[in-house]
Image (spheres, helix red, strand yellow):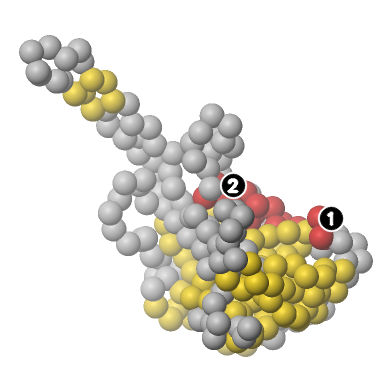
Amino acid sequence: MKKIYQAFVLFFIAHLLFSCTKVVDYDLVSEDPKTVIESRIIKDSFAIARITTTAPYLANEPTPIVDNAFIVISDNVGNKDTLNYIGNGFYRGDDIIGNTANIYTLSVSARGKVHVATTSIPDTVSFSITGANYKDGTTGFEKKGYYPTIQATLPAGDSYYLFKYYKNDSLYRRDNSSLYITDSRFVGTNIQGYETPQPYQINDVAKINIYTLTKEAYNFYNDLDAQLNNDGGFFSTPPANTSTNFSNGPIGLFQGSSLSTHSVTVTP
């Protein structure tokens, strides 16, 4: 994830006189980079984290990575694991495996500061792909193709979810984002015939991943989605930092999730 800094560019074009134009450019506002922490522990998997820093708005270069962080994950039953650096800013644990019964704390020492976050792992959600609805695209609102449908049973009470859709192993993206999040207040506990947001064609492989989220993770993704889809228009949300469950001021999230996944080859 790359944090886009707020930057303001002021352009003034003098009056056009005798075909001469004078342009006055003002420098972009620059700020010190912030640490960015993308980390998660998935049920039945080891913890993984990526540490980078923010970059200036117009920087035409790869996201700066942090390759000398010290990262420790621990749980509430006394286990502890140091994540090993595996390249390109990524760190991976090799001892603690995600379990819905435990609470996890991640401590990240990077760039002279220590950042700590705690999370739990919500239970797995049960779902299946039950078919596909064909649409001919004549309405102008939807593209022509097959839209696989989901059937899911969600637990009672407040619960939060992140959906990811793949077509032939490629992650589907809309506009600037691939984020599809929801909570049980909007979808209830019994989902029947929920369609994918994009169409598939015959013989395409449709894969759907559903991650369960804590409320803190849902809030983070909700804030992030608002920023990624902010077009700067009159009614847009004012730019702001996303929420985080880390201490001491970084950007990012320690996510605990269970993952359910299903795939199907589209047929008529």
Mark 1 and mark 2: Cα distance apart in space: 19 Å
**Quarter holding the C terminus?**
bottom right
Say what secondary structure mark 1 lies in. Answer: helix
Residue 87 appears in the picture as rendered: yes
Q: Is residue 146 found left or right of 64 in the rendered image? A: right
Identify the residue at horizontal 49%, vertical 41% (top origin).
231
Residue 10 sits above or below residue 213 on the image: above
Q: Position of residue 214 (x, y in %)?
A: 75, 63
Say which residue label 2 marks. 226
Q: Residue at x 39, y 40 (%)?
A: 31
Q: Secondary structure at mark 2?
A: helix
* Percent of width and height locating residue 73: 63, 74
Mark 2 belongs to which amino acid?
Ala
From the viewer's perspective, is 44 left or right of 179? right
Q: Which quarter of the picture shows residue 238?
A: top right
Q: Amino acid at mark 1?
A: Arg
The residue that appears at 84% across and 55% down in the rendered structure is 185
Residues packed near mark 1 inside 10 Å, few (<14), some (14 to 19) or many (20 plus): few
Q: Would you identify the image quadrant in which residue 155 lies?
A: bottom right
- Residue 89 is tagged as none
Q: From the image, tell me which residue sits under label 1.
A: 185
